[in-house]
Structures are given as structure tokens and as C-alpha cells.
Image: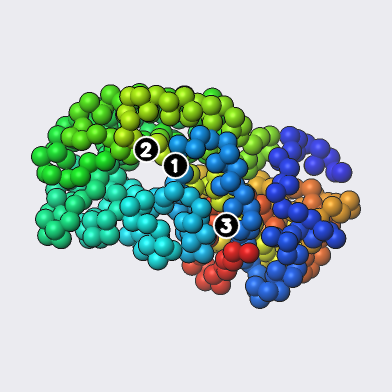
């Protein structure tokens, strides 16, 4: 191993979710080279339906049976993925009319779909009322629009209030609550909003609180859940109807970078068991919901791109591949990273090879930002080999600028 690799400690968490046979990564049992031939092109994303199914089962085993699981489809809106998860989880959370259409087409029950987002257009709110889904109200303006749509369509407008809490999820990768935020309604203004909801005749059902995302510290998640419960309990005193829906958010993270460890679910399960018991006594009609996106799909997906050139520039070796930040913005470090860090990367058709080198993996775009791996120790790769970026099931294709510089779009498959 080179001196460059020795300085890269600590290492990534082991990517053991995908099996390996004869030196090739397997996606739901299919060797990577054969999968690439079946797809017919590179680059592509592949999502393992076995891993997706197993993740839901693992989560149900770790959490109380009373907790409902919702999939936040913004993490991965591929219709095939949404269709699979719609049959495994208890609800789907959407963030646009476009996502609403995908969820409905996938067969999700409108009664279990919720619609969040700070900038819902009037037409989208009307669609939501017509579809019969639950709207997470995020401004006073939405109340009037929903009331008008309910009157015009002669059907109830189902609503919950998305609360901007007066706390944040500590140690989260992205803070979604606490302080000034475009999301939800500030907790101190919620009683006034609830009064307007009651006066407008909307069908109030509950609250949605989401304090942050991508958190790997169980104690921080438990603290946020406890605070969310206490805040919802206080706000329920001002509600025009009993609380039947309480979305405590999610925030469950997955390990992307060196030194990160997988989330310990045991304390989270114990904490939710305590909250479930309190809910049964203090808010008996309320259904407790955990909303997760990347935790369901992130580790079940890989991005696969092919080596099309090897270059050495002043002593540094580059593997040039046929896809990059245009397909996988987050792996390039340009989707929220303050200091760029490498995702776990492998040569998918040379798994376990001991002949390694320190290389940088770069895409075909005319920008130095197009970097998928910076000076990583990888097996010696040749033209035609397949580079795999792990932890790619969430915020991949749909979160990337695929039209940038006119390169072909990426393909996505559920295997």
C-alpha cells in the first residue's frame, strides 16, 4: 500500500451489503459485468431490490410495531423503486405534484400519502385536495387556497401542520429546523395557524416535525424525537380536532465518508417504544410516523461508470471514466459538502485484487470539479473496467445536473 493510502486513515465503513463472487460485485445475485451488458450502456445506477426489502424488514424489527414507516421519495423517485417501496412501507411522502403523480401511479393509497414543501403552487394544492392526500401546511397562505379548493371540489382538504421547531437535530448533515427556516411554520405561530385552519373548516389531522437529516448519532436522534413529541403535545392543546397523525421526522443517516460508522438502531427503538407508550396514554388517536428517505434506499444503490482512459500527470494517475458530477453530483462533493471527502469507491470487476495503486477517478466534463475519487487506493484498473461508487441509492440521478455540457443521461435500473 502506498504512503498516500496510509495517510487516508480512518477507512470507510466496510461495504459488505453487496456480495462478491469471482472478483465481481453482485447486484441481487447478478455479476456486475453481466449486469452492465444487460443494461447495454454505462454509466448507470443499479438498485438492489433484495437490499431494499431487507432494509425495511430490519427497520420494522428494530422499531415498535406501532410506529408507521413512510418513504420520502425525494431521496429516489424512480417509479420502479417507489412501486416496490409502496408495497413495503406504510406511506409515501411527496414534495411536488410530479412526485404525487409517481406515487399515485405506483399504487400508493392516497390516504397514506402526505405532501410537504415550502412553495406549493395553487394548482398543486388543488391537485392534492382532489387526490385526497394529506397536505402538510407550511404557510398561512396555504389555508385559504386549500379552503377554496375544498369548496370548489366539494371534498375535504386534509391537513397537518409542518412545524418549524424551536430546536434543531444536533450533529445532522443538514439542519431542517430551529432558527429562521423556509420550511414549515414557526412553532410560536402555530396556535394562530391552527385557529385559522379551524375557522376555514379544513380537516385537521396532526403535525409534521422534521429537525434535520443525515445523522449518525442515535442520542441526537432520540433527543430530537423527545423534543418533537413534547412540542406536538403542547401544540395539540390548540388544535381544532384530536391529533391522528404525528410525523416525528427521520434524520437516520448512512455512512458515506472515512471514519463514519453505521447508525445504532437499538437506542432509537427503545426511545420510540417509550414515546409510543406515552402516545397511547396522552394522545390515543395519534399514529406515530417516522419519515425516511436515504436510510431506505441509500445503501442499496451503486453508480457504475466505465474507465475510458488512463493518464499520468506529473506523477499522479487519473482514471478517466464516462460519467461524473453530471450524473452523481453528491459523490463529486458538490451537493452540500464543505470539505470534499471521498465516497466509498471500488473497481467492481476487480474486487479483492491485491495489486493496488493510488489514483484519482475523474469524469469526462471540462471542469476540475468533476472528481469521483481523489487519490484513493484502488486495484490497478485498465480501460474497460467498471468503477463503482457505493452509497448511491439516494440523491443521485434526480439530484444531478444531467444536462450539463450535453453528455448522455444516465440509466437507472432496479435489479
Please give the name of the residue rendered at 59% of the width and 29% of the height, measured from the top-left corner. Answer: 266
Above-or-below relation of 383 to 339: below
From the viewer's perspective, is 341 left or right of 236? right
Q: Secondary structure at mark 3?
A: loop
Q: Position of residue 391 (x, y in %)?
A: 62, 49
Distance from Cα at disc 2 to Cα at disc 1: 7 Å
The image quadrant that residue 200 belongs to is top left
| Label 2 Cα crowd, 10 Å radius (few <14 / some 14-19 / many 20+) | some
Q: Nearer the viewer, mark 3 or mark 2?
A: 2
* Residue 257 can be seen, yes or no: yes
Q: Earlier in the sequence, mark 2 or mark 1?
A: 1
Q: Identify the element where label 1 is drawn.
A: strand
Packing grade of label 1 (10 A; few <14, some 14-19, many >=20) is some
Q: Quadrant of residue 269?
A: top right
Residue located beneath label 2 in the image: 287
Q: What residue is shown with label 3?
A: 328
> Which colour assignment does the render follow?
rainbow
Q: Are discs 3 and 2 less than 8 Å apart at CB?
A: no
Q: Residue at x 81, y 65 (%)?
A: 382
Please report the residue visible at 67 percent of the width from the left and 64 percent of the height from the top.
305
Name the residue tied to disc 1.
Answer: 68
Q: Nearer the viewer, residue 288 or 325?
A: 288
Position of the C terminus by quadrant: bottom right
Which of pointers 3 and 2 lies earlier in the amino acid sequence?
Answer: 2
Q: Residue at x 57, y 69 (%)?
A: 411
Pick the front one: 329 or 397: 397
Amino acid at each position: 500500500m502506498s504512503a498516500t493510502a496510509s495517510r487516508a486513515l480512518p477507512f470507510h465503513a466496510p461495504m459488505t451489503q453487496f456480495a462478491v463472487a469471482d472478483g465481481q460485485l453482485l447486484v441481487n445475485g447478478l455479476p456486475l459485468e453481466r449486469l452492465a451488458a444487460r443494461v447495454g450502456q454505462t454509466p448507470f445506477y443499479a438498485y438492489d431490490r433484495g437490499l431494499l426489502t431487507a432494509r425495511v424488514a430490519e427497520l420494522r424489527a428494530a422499531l415498535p410495531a406501532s410506529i408507521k414507516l413512510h418513504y420520502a421519495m425525494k431521496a429516489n423517485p424512480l417509479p420502479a423503486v417507489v412501486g416496490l417501496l409502496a408495497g413495503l412501507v406504510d406511506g409515501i411522502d411527496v414534495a411536488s405534484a410530479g412526485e404525487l403523480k409517481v406515487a399515485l401511479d405506483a399504487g400508493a393509497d392516497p390516504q397514506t400519502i402526505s405532501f410537504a414543501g415550502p412553495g406549493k403552487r395553487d394548482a398543486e394544492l388543488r391537485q392534492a385536495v382532489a387526490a385526497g392526500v394529506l397536505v402538510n401546511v407550511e404557510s398561512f397562505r396555504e389555508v385559504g387556497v386549500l379552503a377554496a379548493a375544498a369548496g370548489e371540489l366539494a371534498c375535504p382538504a386534509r391537513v397537518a401542520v409542518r412545524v418549524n421547531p424551536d430546536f434543531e437535530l444536533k450533529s445532522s448533515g443538514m439542519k431542517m429546523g430551529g432558527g429562521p427556516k423556509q420550511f414549515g411554520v414557526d412553532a410560536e405561530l402555530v396556535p394562530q395557524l391552527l385557529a385559522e385552519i379551524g375557522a376555514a373548516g379544513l380537516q385537521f389531522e396532526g403535525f409534521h416535525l422534521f429537525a434535520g437529516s443525515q445523522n449518525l448519532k442515535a442520542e441526537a436522534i432520540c433527543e430530537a424525537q423527545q423534543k418533537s413529541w413534547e412540542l406536538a403535545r403542547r401544540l395539540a392543546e390548540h388544535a381544532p380536532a384530536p391529533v391522528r397523525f404525528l410525523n416525528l421526522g427521520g434524520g437516520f443517516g448512512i455512512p458515506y465518508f472515512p471514519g463514519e460508522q453505521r447508525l445504532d438502531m437499538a437506542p432509537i427503538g427503545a426511545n420510540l417504544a417509550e414515546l409510543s407508550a406515552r402516545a397511547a396514554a396522552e394522545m390515543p388517536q395519534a399514529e406515530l410516523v417516522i419519515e425516511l428517505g436515504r436510510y431506505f434506499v441509500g445503501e442499496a444503490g451503486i453508480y457504475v461508470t466505465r474507465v475510458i482512459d488512463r493518464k499520468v500527470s506529473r506523477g499522479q494517475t487519473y482514471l478517466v471514466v464516462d460519467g461524473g458530477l453530471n450524473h452523481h453530483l453528491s459523490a463529486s462533493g458538490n451537493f452540500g459538502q464543505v470539505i470534499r471527502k471521498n465516497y466509498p469507491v471500488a473497481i467492481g470487476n476487480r474486487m479483492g485484487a491485491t495489486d493496488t495503486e493510488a489514483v484519482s477517478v475523474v469524469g469526462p466534463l471540462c471542469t476540475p470539479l468533476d472528481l469521483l475519487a481523489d487519490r484513493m487506493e484502488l486495484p490497478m484498473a485498465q480501460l474497460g473496467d467498471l468503477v463503482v461508487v457505493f452509497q448511491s441509492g439516494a440523491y443521485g440521478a434526480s439530484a444531478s445536473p444531467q444536462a450539463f455540457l450535453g453528455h448522455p443521461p444516465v440509466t437507472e435500473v432496479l435489479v
